[in-house]
Structures are given as structure tokens and as C-alpha cells.
Amino acid sequence: KNEVEQSPQNLTAQEGEFITINCSYSVGISALHWLQQHPGGGIVSLFMLSSGKKKHGRLIATINIQEKHSSLHITASHPRDSAVYICAVKSGGSNYKLTFGKGTLLTVNP
Amino acid sequence: GAVVSQHPSRVICKSGTSVKIECRSLDFQATTMFWYRQFPKQSLMLMATSNEGSKATYEQGVEKDKFLINHASLTLSTLTVTSAHPEDSSFYICSATTDNTGELFFGEGSRLTVL
């Protein structure tokens, strides 16, 4: 069983819809990352969270440490949001090793 | 924001040759850099962690003699795939951190195809 589970694996939405991608993890962590990977492969770090909620433009990320769960929300989705969204967690300690989820493929249709 | 640049973005080589991939932090000093590989439709897998001026720490199952990592300066780490074989064909990605903020910055990735 993967230590980081994402759901759904695939998500198709219509432009303008509100999107939620979930991430559950089974280990204690010191930080959680949400990453975006476009078809070309490059990865962009969207958020790093250790508690609470962060917002950047149309993107919102929340984390509940007690429940070991995080969500990534996209408001007013757009076709350019189509990408793979990856959840990655960093366990405690000085080593910055990340454990990655398998990713959620989001397709937003016009 | 901080930028990490990888080069080349795509490389095709013949079996048995060696390929070097560079990872540069353009506007910050990266005390630690990480190398990952990603097979199609799979998660990223950490290959090794490199700290400037010291030997890289390899993950279990990663051959250090095959995947040579050099982190000679605070802005450059290189991954050399030696005696490449078709099964080494993959997407290789680096990331870097300053350790000060805990933030991680990723390169654009390098797609290696070994014929």
C-alpha cells in the first residue's frame, strides 16, 4: 500500500467547474507539497503546507494534520489547468526525502 | 520565484554510451539537490540526494556506479548515466532546495531515450 494515496486517479471536468483532488497519507509528516506536471513533463511546485490553508489565485490547498488528509481545490477551472497533480509528503527529520502519490490526471474541457 | 534549469531537455543516445544531464539553480544557492526518475504513468522515484561538496546518497536499488552524481558547486549538479541501456530510457528530473525555507524547486526534466 502506497504511503500517499490520491483520489481520483483521473478527473474530467467542464470549463468553469470547481475541482477537488484529495490526498491521504499514512505517515507522520512535516510538510506536504502539491505539484503540477504538464504533458511536457516539467514540474511546478504549487504549494507547500504544514498546517491550515493556502490560496494562490484560483488554487486553494488545505491540510488536516490530525486526519492525515489534504485537498487541492481549483475554482473556475480552465483547459490550461489540465495536467497531472501530484501530492508529495516530507516526513520529519532533516532529510528532504519526499514520498509521492501516483498523481491525478485532470482534463478540463472547453 | 526560484528557477531550476535542466539540460538537455531531450537526449537520444546509442546503447553503451554515457549521457550527462545538468541541473542548475539559476537564482539561488542550492545546498541540496535531488535526482528522480519517472517511468510513463508512474510516480516520481527518488534516485539520490546530493549535497554540495560531498558524495551523493543513493536510494536502495540505484546503482551508484551507473548513475554518477556530482554536485561540485552550489548551483550545479550533474547526473551521468554510464553505459546506457534501453531500460535506462526514462524521464529524469532534478529538484533543489536551499534548506532555509524548506521549499523545493523542480527542473523541467530530461527525457532520455537509449536506442
Image: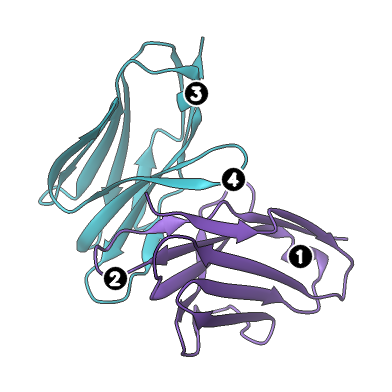
Chain colours: A cyan, B purple
Q: Mark 4 to mark 3: distance in Å?
A: 15 Å
Residue B70, how many percent across, how many down? 58, 82
Tell me which amino acid carries mark 4: Gly
The residue that disc 4 covers is: A41
Q: Chain of mark 1?
A: B
Mark 1 is surrounded, within 10 Å at the Cα level, by few (under 14), some (14 to 19) or many (20 or more) other residues, namely few
The residue that disc 2 covers is: B99
Q: Mark 1 to mark 2: distance in Å?
A: 34 Å
Q: Is residue A32 left or right of residue A103?
A: left
Asked if badges 1 and 2 are on one and the same chain, I answer: yes
Q: Chain of mark 2?
A: B
Q: Which of the two discs, 2 and 3, sits closer to the camera?
A: 2
A68 or B17: nearer the viewer:
B17
The residue that disc 3 covers is: A80
Q: Residue furthest front?
A: B27
Q: Which of the two discs, 2 and 4, sits closer to the camera?
A: 2
Residue B3, how many percent across, how many down? 46, 54
| SS under mark 4 | loop
A35 or B99: nearer the viewer:
B99
Asked if badges 3 and 1 are on one and the same chain, I answer: no
Q: Mark 4 to mark 1: distance in Å?
A: 19 Å
Q: Are marks 3 and 1 in contact (CB under 8 Å)?
A: no
Numbered label attached to residue B3: none
Q: Chain of mark 3?
A: A
Numbered label attached to residue B87: 1
Residue B69, how many percent across, how many down? 59, 80
Check the picture and name the quadrant holding the C terminus of chain B.
bottom right
Mark 4 is surrounded, within 10 Å at the Cα level, by few (under 14), some (14 to 19) or many (20 or more) other residues, namely many
Residue at the image position 30 percent from the left and 58 percent from the top = B103
Q: Mark 2 to mark 3: distance in Å?
A: 32 Å
Report which quarter residue A44 is drawn in. top left
Tell me which amino acid carries mark 3: Arg
